[in-house]
């Protein structure tokens, strides 16, 4: 990165969306300033740079804001050319984008539904998430990572599973991530968490667990995209 470039990331430590952007920046070797936001008392800078949904992450590159984590990751990949995150092949790039959208709409949104549901609605939401995990399990067939032999775009997008899904299960008292049902995903999580870039840039589980317990109890704002 050139010395005249300014890169800032507005985030919040417990947000998986923020972490995936940090992983992308670190994969590229981009130097950046991290600015922690208190989402109960959002800064003037955050509201100025993201007046639309007033959420993190926000990437500020030479004064220009980029919003939404998946968009930010693609922006990072296109701006800093070394160490590509998305596949080079156009078909594989399109496939990775499809699976990322699928994972966001089916799995991430599905787990949020479980987290907030009760009774029969919770049972239905759990079934939908299990069905989604079955599809992703097949996508991992014959691969160490979703990106192949090393982590790539889809691994970063789905990286929240490695910590946050288990935390959500414990907080909301449910279980979907079964090692017998989903051995490939379980193996992928273990491999993912052993990547130096990831294990050095993931929040403490106990601290994260406490945060989400408080969120469920008191309902304060949490970033999600």
Image (cartoon, rainbow, N blue to C red):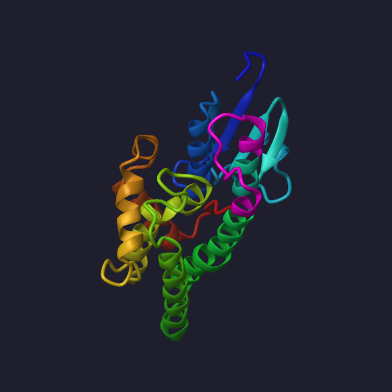
Q: If the image is split into quadrants, where does the N terminus sit?
A: top right
Q: Position of residue 220 (x, y in %)?
A: 50, 55
Q: Residue furthest bottom?
A: 120
Q: Is residue 206 left or right of residue 53?
A: left
Task: Kindly identify the residue that appears in the image at 30 percent across and 64 percent down.
Answer: 183
Q: Nearer the viewer, residue 206 or 184?
A: 184
Q: Position of residue 72 (x, y in %)?
A: 63, 42
Q: Is residue 176 left or right of residue 72?
A: left
Above/below status of 108 relative to 225: below
Q: How many marks?
A: 0
Report if residue 193 lies within the magenta region. Answer: no
Task: Kindly identify the residue that appears in the image at 51 percent across and 62 percent down.
Answer: 108
Report if residue 84 lies within the magenta region. Answer: yes
Q: Nearer the viewer, residue 172 or 145?
A: 145
Above/below status of 107 relative to 161: below
Q: Is any atom of residue 42 visible in this view?
A: no
Toward which corner of the image does residue 85 lie, by quadrant?
Answer: top right
Q: Is any atom of residue 152 visible in this view?
A: yes
Q: Residue furthest top?
A: 3
Q: Position of residue 57 (x, y in %)?
A: 59, 42
Q: Nearer the viewer, residue 37 or 67?
A: 67
Q: Is residue 149 left or right of residue 3?
A: left
Task: Kindly identify the residue that appears in the image at 58 percent across and 36 percent down.
Answer: 10
Task: Kindly identify the residue that appears in the image at 42 percent across and 76 percent down.
Answer: 126
Range of the magenta residues?
Answer: 75-93
């Amino acid at each position: 990165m050139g010395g005249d470039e300014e890169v800032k990331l507005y985030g919040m430590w417990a947000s998986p969306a923020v972490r995936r952007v940090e992983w992308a920046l670190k994969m590229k070797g981009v130097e950046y300033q991290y600015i922690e936001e208190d989402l109960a008392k959002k800064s003037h800078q955050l509201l100025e740079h993201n007046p639309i949904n007033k959420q993190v992450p926000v990437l500020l590159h030479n004064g220009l804001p980029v919003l939404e984590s998946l968009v930010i990751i693609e922006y990072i990949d296109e701006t800093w050319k070394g160490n590509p995150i998305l596949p080079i092949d156009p078909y594989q790039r399109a496939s990775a984008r499809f699976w990322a959208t699928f994972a966001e709409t089916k799995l991430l949104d599905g787990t949020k539904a479980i987290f907030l549901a009760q009774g029969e609605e919770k049972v239905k939401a759990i079934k939908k998430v299990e069905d989604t995990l079955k599809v992703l399990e097949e996508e991992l067939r014959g691969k160490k990572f979703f990106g192949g032999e090393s982590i790539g775009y889809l691994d970063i997008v789905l990286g929240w599973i490695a910590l946050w899904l288990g935390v959500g299960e414990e907080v909301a008292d449910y279980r979907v991530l079964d090692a017998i049902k989903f051995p490939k995903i379980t193996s992928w999580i273990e491999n993912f968490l052993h990547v130096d870039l990831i294990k050095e840039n993931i929040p403490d589980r106990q601290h994260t667990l406490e945060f989400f317990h408080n969120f469920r109890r008191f309902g304060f704002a949490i970033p999600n995209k």
